[in-house]
Amino acid sequence: MNEKLRDAATDRLFEAMLSLRTRDDCYAFFEDLCTVAEIKSLAQRLAVASLLRKGRTYAEIVEETGVSTATISRVNRALAYGADGYETVLDRIEPA
């Protein structure tokens, strides 16, 4: 985990996220917190991570999602060398 991220404000943000109980809670909080473009970007990155784990090619991912190859590369790097956050989440929300 990147210790540069850790501070009281970020801890509070994550506590707020952990307090959300429903999808509607998430929509309301993220709509207030982020722009629509930011939310869509986060959702696209998660979709890219899922597709990469399924062995899809960059070309297939670009065609399906419309994201840039730079975004795919960034997500791929996180899957390979990151803190395993994508892996944790995807293991929990996708069937094996």
Image (cartoon, rainbow, N blue to C red):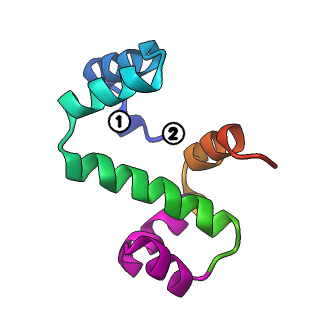
The kind of residue on which mark 2 rests is: Met
Residue tagged 1: 5
Residue 15, position as x, y percentages in the image = 40, 15
Displayed quadrant of residue 54: bottom right
Q: Is residue 32 above or below residue 2?
A: above
Residue tagged 2: 1
Residue located farthest toward the bottom when viewing the structure as drawn: 59
**Left or right: residue 83 compared with residue 73:** right
55, 11: nearer the viewer: 55
**Left or right: residue 22 compared with residue 26:** right
Q: Secondary structure at mark 1?
A: helix
Give the spatial CA distance, label 1 vs label 2: 8 Å
Residue 7, position as x, y percentages in the image = 31, 24
The kind of residue on which mark 1 rests is: Leu
Q: Is residue 41 above or below residue 72?
A: above
- Residue at image location 45% in from the left, 80% down from the top: 62
- Residue at image location 25% in from the left, 21% down from the top: 9
The segment highlighted magenta reads 57-78
Q: Secondary structure at mark 2?
A: loop
**Left or right: residue 60 compared with residue 73:** right
Displayed quadrant of residue 6: top left
1, 53: nearer the viewer: 53
Q: Is residue 95 magenta?
A: no
Labels 1 and 2 touching (C-beta < 8 A): yes
**Left or right: residue 47 compared with residue 32:** right
Please tell me whether the stretch drawn in magenta is mainly helix, strand or loop.
Answer: helix
Packing grade of label 1 (10 A; few <14, some 14-19, many >=20) is: few
Residue 52, position as x, y percentages in the image = 61, 68
Q: Is residue 52 above or below residue 85?
A: below
- Residue at image location 32% in from the left, 56% down from the top: 41
- Residue at image location 70% in from the left, 46% down from the top: 94
